[in-house]
Amino acid sequence: MEKVVCLKTTQSGCLKGLRCLQELTEPSVVTVGNFDGVHRGHRHLLERVALRAKDKGLRSVVLSFYPHPLKILSPAQAPCELTSIQERASLILEQGVEQIVFIRFDRRFSKLSAEEFIREILWSRLKCRHLVVGYDWRFGYKREGEIELAKEMGKEMGFEVEEIEPFRINGHVVSSTLIRRLLHMGRLEEASLYLGRNYVIRRKVVSGDRRGSSLGFPTANLQNTENLCLKEGVYAVRVEGSFMGVANYGVRPTFGGSKRVLEVHILDFEGNLRGKEISVEFLKFLREEKKFSNPEELKRQIEEDISRARGLF
């Protein structure tokens, strides 16, 4: 993704797989945030960024951070991530933004003052000439910076600050926190309303323990799924946009598992997907994960899950 780059700010360097830059070369309209999930509220803001850039003849730029700041500052309070960095970038670019700049968030960067963030990152490095931010934006060391400070510095330095009001649906402010809570409750339909689409992840298929195959239901085991924003249980899913499937997310208690993993049985599919990336779209929560007395009991339940999923499709 040549439109996705990393801004070098500390000795920790840039994110793996991304081109590393010291600064941008063109004046820009910038927005700042984590944009996890790229939900309808995010898209409302991103559309404004693209529009302002077009009106002013500037480049549209999203500045984001990875990992989530709480993973560094307070790991116990860090939320699950709705999207990987690659998924997030793809969704942002779909909104017409021209460039995404990620900063590796570490403890050194977290100590940058609010004034330093404005002067060194936004003004000097990103060439910001118009800043678009959400109503609750905070920035700098210990989130000391408020929008009013950005507006004052903007008047002094020569850039505008545009504040976007919260985006509401049915009276609720759309937020990543709300969507995470709904997904953790298995309320996929409500989460889809605020996301503006069904919840989808894209991950690489890796080798598993082949227990699914031994039961007659081979599964694709997906990498890096131990911290998904999902309720543990069984789901009806769509794979790669066309194949129907049944997915289990959890620790597989029947076999004494302890680590959460996502396994997908793709209906009416034959082939080897190992090493390939596939998309999994979550359509309906079918049941909670539970421990079965023996593999035969589990097999009968899987047959029921598949029958129910086929009925939905």
Image (spheres, rainbow, N blue to C red):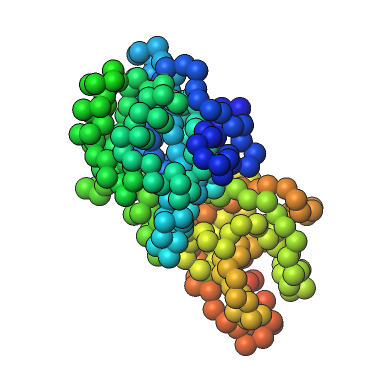
Q: Is residue 68 left or right of residue 298?
A: left
- Residue 200 image offset from top left, x and y in percent: 53, 49
Give the residue drawn at x 44%, y 34%.
Answer: 63
- Residue 262 image offset from top left, x and y in percent: 61, 62
Count of all numbered marks drawn on residues in the image: 0
Which quadrant would the C terminus be assigned to in this image?
bottom right
Q: Nearer the viewer, residue 71 or 259?
A: 71
Q: Is residue 38 left or right of residue 156?
A: right
Which quadrant would the N terminus be assigned to in this image?
top right
Give the quadrant of residue 148: top left
Reply above or below: 82 against 2.
below
- Residue 214 image offset from top left, x and y in percent: 77, 73
Q: Nearer the viewer, residue 305 or 211?
A: 211
Q: Nearer the viewer, residue 147 or 186?
A: 147
Give the residue drawn at x 54%, y 78%.
Answer: 290
Q: Is residue 133 left or right of residue 237?
A: left
Specify the farthest residue to the right. 271
Examine the rendering and report whether any part of residue 251 can be seen. yes
Give the residue drawn at x 60%, y 79%.
Answer: 253
- Residue 270 image offset from top left, x and y in percent: 78, 54
Examine the rendering and report whether any part of residue 82 can be seen. no
Give the residue drawn at x 58%, y 39%.
Answer: 14
Reply above or below: 80 against 39.
below
Give the quadrant of residue 296: bottom right
